[in-house]
């Protein structure tokens, strides 16, 4: 029998803010345990939460980027459960009036090759809600410790509909979501630091069947490839159980990346009754038109929209755009260069193929680059105007720009690399070389075309390499033809 | 300073300090002596630190000598219910659970008291986590009524009321979730004010029922209640439910003659269960207002009879969640008999909480459970809106409502401890003010045949405390109830 998987993803993203969601303590990663705390974060008797405006605004922006509907009023509820990483034994979350309802995310599946764009799809979303993160348990041999540094970090939970069918779609979803969140400056999405976390719900059903199969939730999917691999394993496992005549149980399973398999964590019967109720310590937040409009005006261009603009406005090829749009900072760099470069496509080429390559080899990031967008534009224009050849630019000018941060024109000047300004001068030099080397001329005339290279070399030496080799070639050919 | 210092009003002490006829150290020492002398019988205090009190008083005297007093309470001893956080002081909530907890921070009201120069004198006893009406639910001690030490002080702010009544303190702070300031004030013959919800910051008040809790003063006079409110009221950015306006001058209108007012008498408050002597005293007060030219209007609050049920759903639901943090993991009592973490939760909470607290946690957990939420919590919220509407309609017609504070006077210790429902009825006249968020004041309006105080409750419109104080003050200054003091000596 043919089976089809149905996948929904729950993504938790830490919203990048100065301070925690309900107190003025700073947020961070890797600080001394329990140093990023205060009586509010620790849930001491008598403390009260106050909502962080920045967290709300960034969450609304995410909702808008996801084309979700932003309610007129949003509120917070208490999710009650006991666990030692939770300072109050309830989590302030959102139950029935989340900050964003519905929405969708455009994703791109892998293309047939690196150079060819893959299929685009739209994945429907259920909601996004803003809540507080919990602390972290550290289990030692005979005891457990709690670090509350992470507790109270604003956390936006983005829930998709069961709208995906392959691990590759889930992979593409997370890639696209990550890109969107980075564009919105909502999060750096560093999964190793726990800034982005993902749980997956997956079931399988015979192709053609309408009803969903038994749902399994997978946790501990700690990377984007972990999501893909975990889902691939779990789908195969479920199909095998069904094929073997077995039945599936609704359960929560963990992903063991080292062993490459999922394992049983808890069954549905053990699930909590969270006893949600509106948090009486917080007032509902009204999102009026002015606020909405202001946030809307501050939204960035979405990654795929930008890619389409790069195709249309600059005629960039897919491969260049896919590298550029993965990094908004790089896009900004490119667009700055493109403003001055007479051939923007060449600018993109230089950035993607040369600058990124050099930075990579030097172990530097774009913000550490000594080369600025203007200088890329200059370089492209010097080549376009025939002042230097592409080869010269690549071999001598760009490496020096990269090392020193000097302007390409200055390097050309200082090193005397400029190609002869007038065709007359070059013609004179070529003529002298032809006169001085009758043997070589004769050889060319006798049919040995390669002999012209000797003459070319002489011209290049005479011009100290500044001449345009193509121009030299055609001049020499003309002069020799006159002799013949 | 002539006369007994213990029963001076805040206003008189402010004047005495200002005229330097007494120093803050003398005043503080006198009250500490009084505590030494009578608190063994009253048991209003959970703890106090004599050295620290005198240090605060010395600092105040130095400020006054240098002509740099901080504010209106400079040098005045103030007691604080053991549910409000004072930095470096115990915060027990009269519970085993927090027996050893010391607060690392100040509540907003405490910062305000400190900025006004107050000498924070000690921690006052209460029902555990403010759950109760007699202070018999304290895990530390029972507070007795200074008028008759075989009787209860009321609750949950029993310590705050008894200490003021017994002359151990001129003023104190309490908290009121369903009547916990007004009812003990009425039992002990002092003034107790529950402000409008949101007028006084709750930051640093250990939560019982967040949507009902409010901090307020217990004082000898109505004027003193206004003076205390002036210090503690006002917007606090650390409390999201705090109202963002600047409070008016509460002393205005107390000096000059105000009124006459249009006053309402809700029929539902004079039904079955009201003690005849209490009823007579309240009716006499109503007559006094009528004689003064006030128009007395009969008012109906048709949803009154649902108030207790609604209260015990909403308050316990919120409490079940608010008290979840006391789990044995960090700063609370921790059972030393526990195995794994779940066992630690069960045993620490079983050992750390008293009967009444457990009863309310269980009730609150039940009403929030899936399948019951709509029938209980949601329905209670809807009825709460109706109760609020009842008051809105009433205040469209009148300036204030006159009612008894409690259906009965102080009862014998142990009399109602076995019957929680009978105990809950002590608050029948006070809890609807918390459900509606409106202000209420209790002031002495007479004594019964056994010499026990009776309290008159006046309810007002939200944020109309100035008006409420003026109505209460006009009655107070025409009577001498606040001039009578108990003599809490052993009755041999």
Image (spheres, coloured by chain):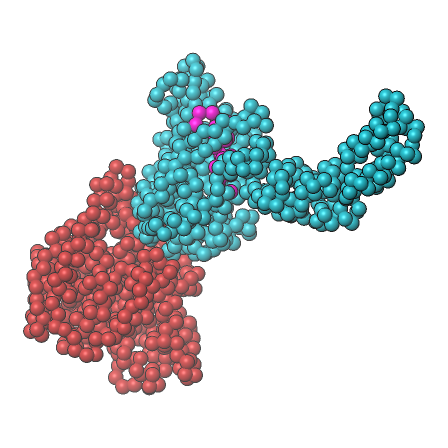
Chain colours: A cyan, B red
> Where does the C terminus of chain B fall, quadrant-wise?
bottom left
Q: Which of the pair B121/A401 is nearer the observer?
A: A401
Q: Residue at x 20, y 63 (%)?
A: B461
Q: Is B149 located above or below residue A198 in the figure?
A: below
Q: Which of the pair B330/A39 is nearer the observer?
A: A39
Q: Is A150 located above or below residue B459 in the figure?
A: above
B242 vs A323, left or right, is left
Q: Residue at x 13, y 64 (%)?
A: B398
Q: At which x and y percent is residue A290?
A: 36, 52
- From the image, give the main secondary structure of the stretch colored magenta: helix
Q: At which x and y percent is residue A28?
A: 52, 50
Verify whether residue A165 appears in magenta.
Answer: yes
Q: Is residue A131 visible?
A: no
Q: Is A83 located above or below residue B175 in the figure?
A: above
What is the number of callouts on the image? Answer: 0
User: What's the magenta region?
Assistant: A164-182
Q: At which x and y percent is residue A328?
A: 55, 42
Q: At which x and y percent is residue A359?
A: 67, 42
Q: Is residue A435 visible?
A: yes
A218 vs A287, left or right, is right
Q: Which of the pair A476/A31 is nearer the observer?
A: A476
Q: Residue at x 86, y 32 (%)?
A: A455
> Where does the N terminus of chain B fall, quadrant-wise?
bottom left
Asked where in the image residue A103 lies, by quadrant, the reply is top left
Asked where in the image residue A418 lies, by quadrant, the reply is top right
Asked where in the image residue A479 lies, by quadrant, the reply is top right
Q: Residue at x 70, y 49 (%)?
A: A407
Verify whether residue A368 appears in magenta.
Answer: no
């Amino acid at each position: 029998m043919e089976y089809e998987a149905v996948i929904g993803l729950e993504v938790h993203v830490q919203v990048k803010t100065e301070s925690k969601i309900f107190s003025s303590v700073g947020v961070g990663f890797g600080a001394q345990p329990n140093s990023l705390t205060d009586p509010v974060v620790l849930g001491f008797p008598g403390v009260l939460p106050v909502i962080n405006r920045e967290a709300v605004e960034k969450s609304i922006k995410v909702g808008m980027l996801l084309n979700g509907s932003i309610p007129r009023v949003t509120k917070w509820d208490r999710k009650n459960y006991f666990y030692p990483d939770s300072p109050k034994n309830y989590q302030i979350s959102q139950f029935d009036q989340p900050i964003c309802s519905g929405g969708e995310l455009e994703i791109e599946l892998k293309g047939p090759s690196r150079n060819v764009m893959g299929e685009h799809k739209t994945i429907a979303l259920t909601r996004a809600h803003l809540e507080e993160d919990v602390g972290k348990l550290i289990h030692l041999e005979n005891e457990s410790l709690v670090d509350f540094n992470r507790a109270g970090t604003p956390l936006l939970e983005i829930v998709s509909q069961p709208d995906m069918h392959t691990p590759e779609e889930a992979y593409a979803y997370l890639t696209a979501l990550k890109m969107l969140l980075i564009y919105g400056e909502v999060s750096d999405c560093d999964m190793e630091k726990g800034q982005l976390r993902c749980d997956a719900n997956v079931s399988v059903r015979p192709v053609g069947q309408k009803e969903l199969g038994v749902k399994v939730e997978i946790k501990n999917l700690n990377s984007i490839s972990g999501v893909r691999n975990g889902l691939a394993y779990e789908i195969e496992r479920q199909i095998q159980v069904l094929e073997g005549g077995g039945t599936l149980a609704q359960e929560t399973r963990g992903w063991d990346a080292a062993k490459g398999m999922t394992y049983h964590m808890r069954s549905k019967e053990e699930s909590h009754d969270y006893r949600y109720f509106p948090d009486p310590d917080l007032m509902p937040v009204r999102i009026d038109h002015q606020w909405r409009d202001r946030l809307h005006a501050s939204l960035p261009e979405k990654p795929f929209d930008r890619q389409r603009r790069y195709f249309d406005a600059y005629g960039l090829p897919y491969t260049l755009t896919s590298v550029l749009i993965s990094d908004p900072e790089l896009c900004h760099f490119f667009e700055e260069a493109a403003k001055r470069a007479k051939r923007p496509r060449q600018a993109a080429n230089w950035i993607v193929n040369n600058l990124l390559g050099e930075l990579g080899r030097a172990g530097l990031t774009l913000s550490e680059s000594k080369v600025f967008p203007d200088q890329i534009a200059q370089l492209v224009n010097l080549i376009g105007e025939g002042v230097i050849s592409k080869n010269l630019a690549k071999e001598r000018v760009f490496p020096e720009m990269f090392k020193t941060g000097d302007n390409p024109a200055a390097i050309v000047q200082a090193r005397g690399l400029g190609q002869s300004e007038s065709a007359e001068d070059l013609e004179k030099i070529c003529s002298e070389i032809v006169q001085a080397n009758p043997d070589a001329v004769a050889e060319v005339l006798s049919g040995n075309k390669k002999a012209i290279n000797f003459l070319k070399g002489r011209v290049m030496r005479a011009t100290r390499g500044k001449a345009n080799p193509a121009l030299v070639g055609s001049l020499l050919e003309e002069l020799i033809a006159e002799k013949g | 300073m002539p006369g007994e210092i213990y029963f001076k009003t805040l206003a008189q002490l402010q004047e005495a300090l200002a005229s330097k006829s007494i120093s803050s150290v003398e005043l503080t020492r006198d009250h500490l002596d009084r505590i030494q002398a009578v608190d063994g019988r009253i048991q209003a205090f959970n703890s106090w630190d004599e050295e620290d009190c005198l240090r605060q008083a010395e600092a105040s005297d130095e400020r006054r000598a240098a002509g740099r007093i901080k504010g209106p309470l400079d040098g005045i001893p103030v007691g604080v219910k053991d549910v409000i956080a004072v930095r470096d002081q115990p915060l027990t909530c009269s519970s085993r659970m927090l027996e050893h907890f010391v607060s690392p921070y100040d509540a907003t009201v405490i910062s305000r008291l400190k900025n006004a120069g107050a000498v924070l004198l000690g921690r006052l006893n209460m029902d555990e986590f403010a759950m109760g009406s007699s202070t018999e639910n304290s895990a530390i001690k029972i507070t007795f009524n200074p008028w008759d030490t075989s009787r209860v002080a009321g609750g949950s702010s029993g310590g705050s009321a008894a200490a003021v009544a017994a002359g151990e303190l001129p003023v104190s702070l309490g908290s009121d979730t369903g009547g916990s300031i007004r009812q003990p004030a009425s039992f002990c013959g002092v003034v107790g004010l529950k402000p409008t919800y949101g007028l006084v910051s709750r930051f640093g008040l250990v939560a019982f029922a967040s949507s009902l809790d409010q901090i307020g003063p217990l004082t000898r006079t109505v004027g003193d209640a206004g003076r205390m409110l002036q210090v503690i009221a006002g917007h606090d950015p650390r409390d999201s439910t705090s109202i963002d306006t600047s409070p008016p001058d509460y002393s205005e209108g107390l000096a000059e003659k105000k009124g006459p007012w249009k006053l309402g008498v809700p029929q539902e408050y004079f039904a079955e269960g009201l003690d005849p002597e209490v009823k007579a005293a309240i009716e006499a007060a109503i007559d006094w207002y009528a004689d003064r030219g006030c128009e007395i209007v009969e008012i109906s609050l048709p949803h009154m009879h649902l108030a207790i049920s609604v209260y015990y759903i909403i308050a316990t639901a919120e409490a079940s969640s608010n008290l979840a943090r006391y789990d044995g993991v960090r700063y609370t009592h921790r059972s030393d008999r526990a195995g794994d973490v779940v066992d630690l939760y069960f045993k620490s909470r079983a050992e750390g909480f008293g009967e009444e607290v457990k009863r309310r946690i269980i009730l609150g957990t039940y009403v929030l459970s899936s399948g019951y939420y709509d029938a209980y919590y949601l329905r209670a919220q809807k009825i709460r809106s109706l109760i609020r509407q009842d008051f809105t309609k009433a205040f469209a017609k009148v300036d204030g409502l006159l009612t008894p504070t409690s259906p009965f006077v102080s009862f014998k210790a142990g009399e109602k401890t076995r019957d929680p429902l009978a105990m809950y009825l002590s608050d029948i006249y006070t809890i609807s003010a918390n459900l509606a968020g409106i202000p209420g004041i209790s002031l002495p309006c007479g004594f019964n045949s056994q010499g026990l105080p009776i309290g008159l409750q006046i309810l007002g419109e939200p944020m109309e405390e100035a008006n409420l104080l003026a109505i209460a003050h006009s009655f107070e200054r025409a009577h001498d109830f606040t001039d009578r003091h108990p003599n809490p000596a052993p009755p041999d």
